[in-house]
Image: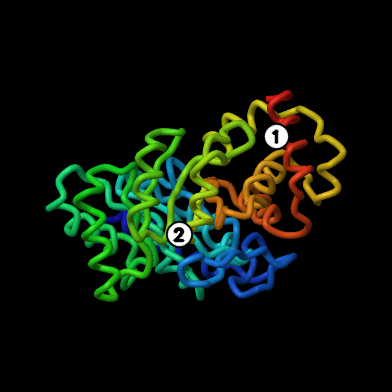
């Protein structure tokens, strides 16, 4: 056992040893307000509308402190009622960081969402098994073809895994508005459970076809890049929140952006990524309380477009 590994074990052990009521709440403590849930259209299973992404934020390599901070974020996420954690082989060390934290935290209700991301279809099963081992889970709740890479090869593999009981849900992903035409064709022709796309008040192309089709075809929608990887919240930093923010219980632009996203009736879950405990708690609060109606959603989009 290497000294770096022992160090990580000690740090994560200290995470579990922190008394309740201090920096890290009890994993089983009730959240301040109940998170809104949405049913997965294909099964009816309820998922909280705020999930947790891991792109960049959990790619901390072997750094013990970085791994501890990631574990703290995950612990706060589960303590606040979160379930869906999303990652990918593309995300560097994120899968292993997640798996190590899950082993220490042992959450009661994880919804594990990962991806297959490799050009050779024959290599897909091996990559999937490696991902499962890194997560330290018996099986994934959701596997997605990442950015449609070799989807013609990988999608049959995932569907066969689902049929055999080795996977619960199947999906496809894209980001930054890419390949929407192909996404629509797959949604219309393949028996998938989820589609993952980018969506926020400035990136609304999915409202035209993808979100309506998702409702029509009973496909769940996971939203990535809700803050444009921080670019949107940075652009709004220092701008006063309009009066409507108080009407829906928002104390930050991040919460307003998330409430805009998850209030769309086709959206199942948004997956903001963060490396900070205060931010994950702030994000979770956006999944509770009053949600904007259609009229307020239009006002939010107009104000964000004007100010960002």
Which residue is denoted by mark 2 in the rendering?
11
Residue 98 x %, y %: 40, 57
Indicate the secondary structure of the residue bearing disc 1. helix
- Nearer-the-camera pick, 27 or 116: 116
Sequence-wise first label, 2 or 1? 2
- The kind of secondary structure element at disc 2 is helix
Residue 131: image location, x then y, percent: 28, 58
108 or 207: nearer the eye?
207
Q: Horizontally, is 128 left or right of 263 in the view? A: left
Q: Residue at x 64, y 36 (%)?
A: 201
Most extreme residue toward the left, as rendered? 122
Q: Quadrant of the C terminus?
A: top right
Q: Is residue 70 above or below residue 56?
A: below
The colour mode here is rainbow
Q: Quadrant of the N terminus?
A: bottom left
Tag shown at residue 165:
none
Horizontal placement of 149 versus 274: left or right? left
The part of the image, by quadrant, that contains residue 38 is bottom right
Q: Position of residue 257 (x, y in %)?
A: 67, 41
Badge 2: residue crowd in 10 Å (few <14, some 14–19, many ≥20) = some
The residue that mark 1 highlights is 301
Residue visible at 69% across and 48% down?
259
Q: Residue 120 in the image: x percent, y percent? A: 15, 46
Of circles 2 and 1, the one toward us is: 1
| Local crowd size for mark 1, using a 10 Å CA cut-off: few (<14), some (14–19), many (≥20) | some
Tell me which residue sits at (49%, 45%) in the image: 210
Are the two marked residues, 2 and 1, in contact with CB atoms closer than 8 angstroms?
no
């Amino acid at each position: 056992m290497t000294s770096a590994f022992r160090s990580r074990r000690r740090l994560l052990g200290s995470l579990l040893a922190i008394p309740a009521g201090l920096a890290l709440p009890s994993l089983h403590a009730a959240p301040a307000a109940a998170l809104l849930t949405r049913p997965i259209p294909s099964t009816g299973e309820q998922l909280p509308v705020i999930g947790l992404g891991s792109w960049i934020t959990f790619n901390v390599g072997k750094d013990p402190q970085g791994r501890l901070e990631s574990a703290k974020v995950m612990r706060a996420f589960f303590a606040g009622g979160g379930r869906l954690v999303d990652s990918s082989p593309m995300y560097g060390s994120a899968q292993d960081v997640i798996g190590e934290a899950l082993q220490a935290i042992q959450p009661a209700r994880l919804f594990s969402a990962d991806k297959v991301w490799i050009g050779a279809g024959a290599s897909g099963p091996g990559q999937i098994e490696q991902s499962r081992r890194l997560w330290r889970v018996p099986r994934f709740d959701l596997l997605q073809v990442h950015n449609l890479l070799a989807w013609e090869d990988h999608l049959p593999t995932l569907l066969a895994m689902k049929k055999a009981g080795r996977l619960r849900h199947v999906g496809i992903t894209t980001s930054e508005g890419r390949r929407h035409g192909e996404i629509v064709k797959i949604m219309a022709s393949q028996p998938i459970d989820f589609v993952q796309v980018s969506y926020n008040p400035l990136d609304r192309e999915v409202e035209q076809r993808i979100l309506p089709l998702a409702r029509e075809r009973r496909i769940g929608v996971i939203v990535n890049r809700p803050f444009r990887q921080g670019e949107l919240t940075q652009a709004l930093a220092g701008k006063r929140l309009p009066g409507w923010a108080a009407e829906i219980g928002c104390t930050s632009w991040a919460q307003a952006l998330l409430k805009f996203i998850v209030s769309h009736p086709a959206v199942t879950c948004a997956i903001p990524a963060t490396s900070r405990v205060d931010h994950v708690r702030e994000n979770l609060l956006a999944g509770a309380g009053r949600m904007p109606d259609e009229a307020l959603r239009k006002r939010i989009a107009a104000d964000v477009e004007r100010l960002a």
